[in-house]
Amino acid sequence: QKRLEKCEKELADLEKAIVDFFYFYPAYKTDREISGLRFNMPILRENLKIDRLFQYLEDYRNKELETRIRKMLKIYTIA
């Protein structure tokens, strides 16, 4: 039981994983590159918490990162 709890605490939530992905892979900039990632749209639309996503984004204070994430949200028609 404790091992499972530890594992759950170490996993990033969806919003943090998305911000981290775009932070560590800045080459994904264009609409074509981002749409080519082929994120699972139903999962994103159902589970993504936009407010939490932008809270994580604020921590980075990176306009380029924010631009890429806003582009991803537009491409996947989430926001």
Image: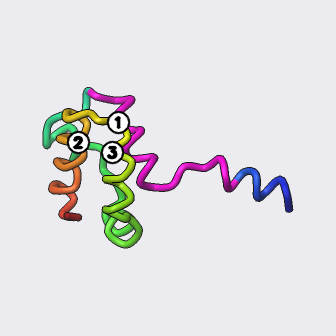
Q: In this figure, which residue is indicated by the disc labeled 2?
A: 66
Q: Residue at x 35, y 33 (%)?
A: 23
Label 1 sits on a secondary structure element that is helix
For the residues labelled 3 and 1, say whether their Cβ atoms are less than 8 Å apart. yes
Residue at 72% over, 51% down: 7
Alpha-carbon span between mark 2 and mark 1: 9 Å
Q: Position of residue 9 (x, y in %)?
A: 67, 53
The vertical placement of 40 against 66, above or below, is below
Circle 1 residue = 60
* Predominant SS along the magenta part: helix
Of badges 2 and 1, nearer the viewer stands: 1
Asked if marks 3 and 2 touch (Cβ < 8 Å), the reply is yes
Question: Within the magenta stretch, is there residue 20?
Answer: yes
Q: Which residues are magenta?
A: 8-26
Q: Residues within 10 Å of mark 2 (few under 14, many from 20)?
A: some
Disc 3: which residue = 57
Give amino acid for label 3. Answer: Leu
